[in-house]
Amino acid sequence: MNDRSFLGENRGFFLALEGMDGSGKTTQVDLLSKWFFSKNLKCTVAREPGGTKTGEAIRSVVQENLDLDIPPETELLLYLAARSVFVKEIAIPVLDRGEIFLTDRFSMSTLAYQGYARGLDLTEVGRLNDFASAGLNADLYIVLDIPAELSRERLALAKKKKDRLELSGVDFMQKVRSGYLDISRKMENAVVVDGTENPETIHLKIREILIREMPATFGI
């Protein structure tokens, strides 16, 4: 990865945190955003799917309306519809301002969940994602890796209502995990971090990755 300062340039830095539900993405997004602000780095935080009125409405339909029988292909297209407006209304304007864009999930989730776990053709999933995202990709993906059983345990402890994906079972989540790890091995802009450690240790490891990869931006 090329080292350069993203501040003051035409395009900002796009960082996406990925992983199964319960992997700690939301916690790490919060810790990172606070770290960025402490270093006077302008940062916008968003989550996928969602972040826009249209995206949140789609999220509600595809994840929370459990009465609907949604085929994998329809699920994929709904998520990509949310991504399309997410990119247009949030991601591109933030990056065009030269700011850091920090997201809880992006396109890697689609490959892991709808491609590897749902069994849809990976080439076609990738092609459709490129169309929906207008070719936009994160500069760096941080993948928080945890076993499927730990994901289930953490979600049970959280006592929150499970969504459609979380109700798909341990076998499904194991496929998701395998998908994330396989994708990460094939991508130069993806780093896997052990998500079983305590949140502060994970946060410090992510800091180290950012400083190592982009010292001009994050090492100041």
Image (cartoon, grey):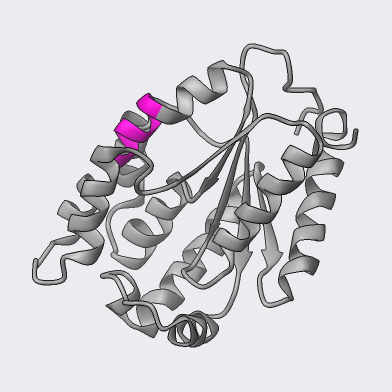
Prevailing SS of the magenta stretch: helix
Q: Nearer the viewer, residue 4 or 183?
A: 4
Q: Nearer the viewer, residue 186 or 158?
A: 158
- The correct choice, above or below, for 78 with respect to 5 in the image is below
- The correct choice, above or below, for 103 with respect to 95 in the image is below
Q: In the rendered structure, which segment of residues is drawn in magenta? A: 82-89
In the image, is residue 198 part of the stretch drawn in magenta? no
- The correct choice, above or below, for 105 with respect to 95 in the image is below
Q: Answer left or right for 171 relative to 199.
A: left
Q: Residue at x 75, y 65 (%)?
A: 202
Quadrant location of the C terminus in the rendered image: top right
Q: Answer left or right for 219 relative to 176.
A: right
Quadrant location of the N terminus in the rendered image: top right
Task: Name the image quarter holding residue 11.
Answer: top right
Q: Residue at x 53, y 54 (%)?
A: 183
Residue 83 visible within the image: yes
Residue 81 visible within the image: no
Q: Residue at x 43, y 27 (%)?
A: 135
Q: Position of residue 28 (x, y in %)?
A: 65, 58
Q: Position of residue 24 (x, y in %)?
A: 59, 67
- The correct choice, above or below, for 59 with respect to 66 in the image is above
Outermost residue to the left: 68
Task: Name the image quarter holding residue 197.
Answer: bottom right
Q: Nearer the viewer, residue 3 or 11?
A: 11
Q: How many marks?
A: 0
Q: Position of residue 150 (x, y in %)?
A: 54, 84
Q: Nearer the viewer, residue 200 or 83?
A: 200
